[in-house]
Every structure is written in structure tokens, then in C-alpha cells.
Amino acid sequence: MYYEAIIFDLDNTLLNFELCERQAILGTLETCAISLDLHGITETNFLQVYETYSSQYWRQRNVFTPNELIKMSYESTLAELNIKTEKISHLGQIFWQIFNHSSFMEPNVYEVLTVLARSYRLAVISNGLVSAQLPRMQAAGIDHFFEEVVVSEAIGFAKPSPEIFNHALSKLDLTPAQVLYVGDSLNHDYAGATQVNMDFCYYNRKNQNLSQEVQPKFIINKLLKLLELVK
């Protein structure tokens, strides 16, 4: 199968979102001189509580700003764990300063992009904030590989909406048949690519079992294997 372009998801396909977020969550505490050890709390415990509140609050992202959502997540976590700080108003701002410059990549990303860029046009479709996604790509040193970077915040549509995929195709002036899409999410990436009849390569980074109804064109568990598919 010959493709003109390969489009990638960003988080947990090229960049490791969990590690980027972990660095920001714990780095914010360190910057604010909040010691978990002094309160007898492990990093794992703090992260578990934080993630519980964060997932709840981010469902309200149409109501609150990103700064407010992060601040609310910290407030609830610190309250539950009985940790007091006078710097609560700065936590959201500090989090984003750290997160927006985090650069943890999935294994072999730079090598894979270097090889693919010799033969294919490359692009990114990402759900997220422009202020977070673009600086993180720059921090990782991979931004120069991509002809187009389409971020949901900028166009008002998010995956799996077909509009965001069609927008990327329009920017590239290509048809779905000319593009392979690579991503780690069945709900966002696979569902969206399928709606526009774009071939999909599932980056099964955690080796999850798939139901029979899910049938990506390709399945890989290492990005290096992508080179074998499209060489």
C-alpha cells in the first residue's frame, strides 16, 4: 500500500502523556515546596487521588479554563490528603509552565520520524490545547518533521469528529486513500479515521486485547514496526 502522507496522533503515540503529566503534577509540588514525605504520603498515592479529581473536573472543560481545572484538581487533592499550602492560587499556572515544556517521547520516535520524513509528508492531529501541544513538540525536538499540526482547540472540532480529519486532509490537499493515520486510541483515533475511510494503524502500546468488531488496517506495539509496514 502506497501512501503520500502519514498523520500521527500526538499524546501516547509520539509523546508519552503519562510521563509528561506526572512530571508536571509532582514538579508543581516541588516548586511550591510542598513535601509529600513530611505528610507521610507517597507519590503514587498523591497521583491516584489527583487523577480521580482531575478526570472529574476535566469533564467540565467547556465551563472552566484549563488553569481553573488544574487548580480545582489540586485543591480537592490537597484537601483530601490534609495538605495545606498558601500557594494554591499559583498551582495551575506553575503546572502549565512545566507541562507545556515537557518532552517525554515514546520509544524510538525520533528515529522513526527521521526515516519516514525521507519518503512521506508527515502531519499531526491532536486533541488538546495549542498552548500545550506545540511547545511540547518543540521541547521534544520533533516539530520540524511535520508539515501540518492540527489541534482541536484551534479548529473547534475534536477527534473522533470527522471534521478534524477532513480539515487535516484539506490542509494537505490529499484524499483519505492517500493517508495512513497512526494513533493509540480506539475511541478517538480509530473511530475518527474509520468515519472518513482513512487507513488506520493502531499503536497498541499496552498490548490490549481487541474485540472482533475492531479491525484496524495495521496493528503495532512498537513504533519501529511502522517502518516495516510502509518502507
Image (cartoon, rainbow, N blue to C red):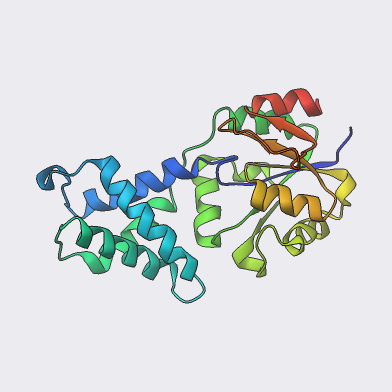
Q: Would residue 205 appear left or right of 30 to someone viewing this image?
A: right
Q: Would residue 92 appear left or right of 120 to someone viewing this image?
A: left
The answer to whether 32 is drawn above or below residue 139 in the figure is: below
Determine the residue located farthest toward the left in the rendered image.
38
Determine the residue located farthest toward the bottom in the rendered image.
63
| x then y, percent, for residue 200 | 77, 42
Quarter of the view holding residue 119: top right
Viewer can see residue 124: no
Q: Would residue 202 appear left or right of 229 to someone viewing this image?
A: left
| x then y, percent, for residue 138 | 53, 47
Q: Residue at x 66, y 25 (%)?
A: 224
| x then y, percent, for residue 169 | 81, 55
Q: Residue at x 59, y 40 (%)?
A: 14
Q: Residue at x 33, y 62 (%)?
A: 73
Quarter of the view holding residue 129: bottom right
Q: Residue at x 51, y 36 (%)?
A: 105
The answer to whether 218 is drawn above or below residue 8 in the figure is: above
Nearer to us in this view, 184 or 140? 184
Nearer to us in this view, 18 or 7? 18
The answer to whether 10 is drawn above or below residue 79 in the figure is: above
| x then y, percent, for residue 43 | 26, 42
Q: Quadrant of the N terminus?
A: top right
Q: Quadrant of the C terminus?
A: top right
Viewer can see residue 118: yes
The answer to whether 56 is drawn above or below residue 11 in the figure is: below
Determine the residue located farthest toward the front in the rendered image.
212
